[in-house]
């Protein structure tokens, strides 16, 4: 858990997580930031949103990247 002035800001999930009703291990995820809190303590992200369960917490799409001078589409 990350804190600023004693208040939680975010949590980094390094262990595998899954939504409660997922039975398939392929839907388990790790290494994502969830939840993210406002200064007043409200959670502003979702772990596994109902309609986009492949998104987890803070989502960023890296669709135009290069690694070792090779184009990759994650």
Image (cartoon, helix red, strand yellow):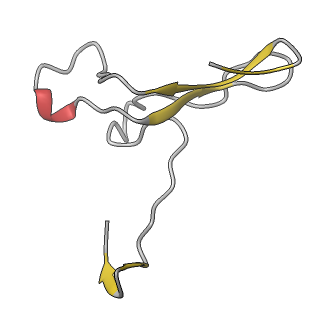
Q: Point out residue 48 in the picture as x, y percentages from the top left corner.
A: 39, 29
Q: Point out residue 45 in the picture as x, y percentages from the top left corner.
A: 59, 31
Count every numbered label the image shows and give the total.
0
Vertical order, 49 against 55 (above or below) = above
Q: Quadrant of the N terminus?
A: top right
The structure residue drawn at horizontal position 41% and vertical position 72%, both measured from the top left corner, is: 63
Vertical order, 43 against 67 (above or below) = above
Return the residue found at the far bottom.
69
Q: Classify residue 49 as left or right of residue 16.
A: right
Q: Classify residue 67 as left or right of residue 62.
A: left
Return the residue found at the far front.
68
Q: Quadrant of the C terminus?
A: bottom left
Along the line of sight, the residue nearer the viewer: 43 or 50 = 43
The structure residue drawn at horizontal position 40% and vertical position 42%, both measured from the top left corner, is: 55
The structure residue drawn at horizontal position 37% and vertical position 41%, both measured from the top left corner, is: 52
Residue 50, by quadrant, is top left
Q: Point out residue 67 in the picture as x, y percentages from the top left corner.
A: 36, 77
Q: Classify residue 55 as left or right of residue 43.
A: left
Q: Point out residue 56 in the picture as x, y percentages from the top left corner.
A: 43, 37
Along the line of sight, the residue nearer the viewer: 23 or 28 = 28
Residue 28, by quadrant, is top left
């Amino acid at each position: 858990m990350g804190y600023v002035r004693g208040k939680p800001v975010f949590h980094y999930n390094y262990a595998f997580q899954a939504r409660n009703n997922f039975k398939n291990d392929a839907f388990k995820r790790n290494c994502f930031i969830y939840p993210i809190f406002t200064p007043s303590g409200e959670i502003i992200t979702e772990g596994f949103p109902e309609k986009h369960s492949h998104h987890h917490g803070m989502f960023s799409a890296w669709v135009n990247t290069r690694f070792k001078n090779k184009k990759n589409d994650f």
